[in-house]
Image: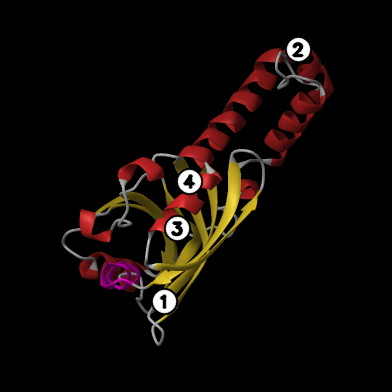
Amino acid sequence: MQSADLTLQLPPSMRLPSPEEPLESFQREEVLSWEVDRQSETVRFLSLVVGDSSALGNLAENLESVHRYDITPVDEDTFYGYVEMDLRAADATLLGTFDVPGLVIVPPMVYTGRENVHVTVLGEPEAMSRLLERAPDEVDIEVTRVSEHQRRSETLAGRLTARQFEALEVARDGGYYEVPRSGALTTVAEELECSESAASTLLRSAEAELVDAALLR
């Protein structure tokens, strides 16, 4: 069984029908769960959004297609958003692309712009091929990774080793990541019982994985 990371570039017809300005207030949206009700022709989804929560409220109020929405703040820059809205033909086409026997989407689906969607799928090679074959011609799909499935690969537990977790915890507890910094790399190395060079490598490699997790998925 394989997993693949895909980046989809949506055409204007598949983007949210709204002015550009409110959407610029959202840096990232992770669609955690969704449900398509074809009988009532609605779609419901829960997202974790980085951006201005008031912009989502204003956007939802101004879109006739939105029947219900709810916002739950996490902090001043992040919030959960629940939305129930009409299922557009374009939405059904996009979601139907992934309706392939033997294929599953690994949440979240990540939007990093109005037109860019990052999706991880899991399935047999034949199912992956069928997905690409049935994708609408107007949707550009870039396959950024294909590999054998590893159960932990889409979590932080899969991205970081136990030693990297330990290094980050020691560095944080020692004030290394405070602003301004109050801890020294020397202290981190001493706690880890390794050289400063080794401690630096552990932290930088862990930080690189976290940056990829934040910006790519």
Q: Amino acid at mark 3?
A: Ala
The kind of residue tagged 1 is Thr
Residue 95 on image: x %, y %: 35, 69
The quarter holding residue 82 reads: bottom right
Mark 2 and mark 1 lie on one chain; the one further toward the N terminus is 1
Vertically, is 56 above or below 170? below
Which residue reaches farthest left?
137
Left or right side of 213 for 156? right
The residue identified by callout 1 is 42
Q: Residue flagged by tag 4: what amino acid is it?
A: Ala
Q: Residue at x 69, y 21 (%)?
A: 199
Q: Which residues are magenta?
A: 88-95
Assess disc 3: are there few (<14), some (14-19) or many (≥20) residues with their C-alpha within 10 Å of its C-alpha.
Answer: many
Label 4 sits on residue: 55
- Going by the numbered disc 2, the residue's amino acid type is Ala
In front here: 75 or 31?
A: 75
Residue 14 seen in the figure = yes
Given the current orientation, which residue lies at the most extreme bottom position? 39
